[in-house]
Image: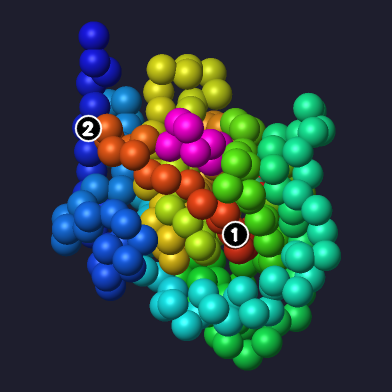
Amino acid sequence: MAPDKSVVACRGRYLGSCASSGLLAAKDDALILGSSRELVQSLGSQVEVRTGFITEEDEEAFLRELEPGLKKKRYEFDHWDDAIHGYRETERVRWGAACEEVLTRVRSVVFADGSKLLGPVHVLDLDKTGYIKPHIDSVKFCGSTIAGLSLLSDSIMRLVKEDSPSQWLDLLLPRRSLYILRDQARYNFTHEILKDEESVFNGQRVPRQRRIAIICRNLPG
Ligand code: OGA
Ligand code: MN
């Protein structure tokens, strides 16, 4: 039997980024889909997707800044015990003006004034065939909130309740969107990024290209 699906619209702004990334975007397109209406509602404030958070120019600025360093690394594929398959990554503390401006905007939207943030921003470059297996970020090193910008590709992030796997949420992360996971969504649910073959949202294929995530985290409290 089909699961009891419920869809909640993210009332984010659409700036045409979905159309250019191949998704048919309507104003009230839903970006969050869950195993039940109750779950979507109860996690509502702890999971957010903001479409069109950065412009194409912002995305280009990140690529210009990151590509030279990333190109020198090889994608890692065969560490069987890794949470991530087909990736290369780096961290960066100091950014050029254009990127810094975007990151300041991310931090002001995501974190309360005065929260202690993890200094370096994490850059995760997934190959087209790369994916992230279900995991929970280290509670020792990271605090209650994880926020990520998605560059170059749409993707699907799946959250599954650790002690009750029939409870899940799928988030559609359009290219140039920002997602935010907080509290329960961060501690009690695993998160993963689906591989291309499995990348289907609400019955619609969401082709996965190379994807770069720019991830900001706070420190444990
Ligand atoms: C991670 C992670 C998510 C993303 O690096 O721990 O879950 O958006 N990344 O790439
Ligand atoms: Mn993670």
Callout 1 crowding tier (Cα within 10 Å): few <14, some 14–19, many ≥20: many
Considering only vertical position in the picture, is 109 above or below 133?
A: below
Residue found 58% across the figure and 81% down from its top: 61
Of residues 187 and 167, which is closer to you in this image? 167
In the picture as drawn, the residue positioned furthest to the bottom comes out as: 97
Considering only vertical position in the picture, is 42 above or below 217?
A: above
Q: Secondary structure at mark 1?
A: strand
Magenta span covers which residues? 191-199
Q: Give me the disc on residue 212.
A: 1
Image location of residue 13, percent across then percent down:
26, 68
Callout 2 crowding tier (Cα within 10 Å): few <14, some 14–19, many ≥20: some
Q: Secondary structure at mark 2?
A: strand
> Is residue 49 covered in magenta?
no
In the picture as drawn, the residue positioned furthest to the left comes out as: 27
Q: Can residue 192 be spotted in the picture?
A: yes
- Residue type, mark 2 in image: Ser
- Residue type, mark 1 in image: Ile
- Reading the image, the residue beneath label 2 is 6
The colour mode here is rainbow
Of the residues under marks 1 and 2, which one precedes in the sequence? Answer: 2
Image location of residue 5, percent across then percent down:
24, 27
Considering only vertical position in the picture, is 167 above or below 59?
A: above
Residue found 27% across the figure and 70% down from its top: 16
Residue found 28% across the figure and 72% down from its top: 15
**Along the horizontal axis of the image, is 18 left or right of 210?**
left
Of residues 104 and 123, which is closer to you in this image? 123
**Along the horizontal axis of the image, is 16 left or right of 182?**
left
In the rendered image, the quadrant that contains the N terminus is top left
Q: Is mark 1 within 8 Å of ligand 1?
A: no
User: Looking at the image, is mark 1 or mark 2 nearer the viewer?
Assistant: 1
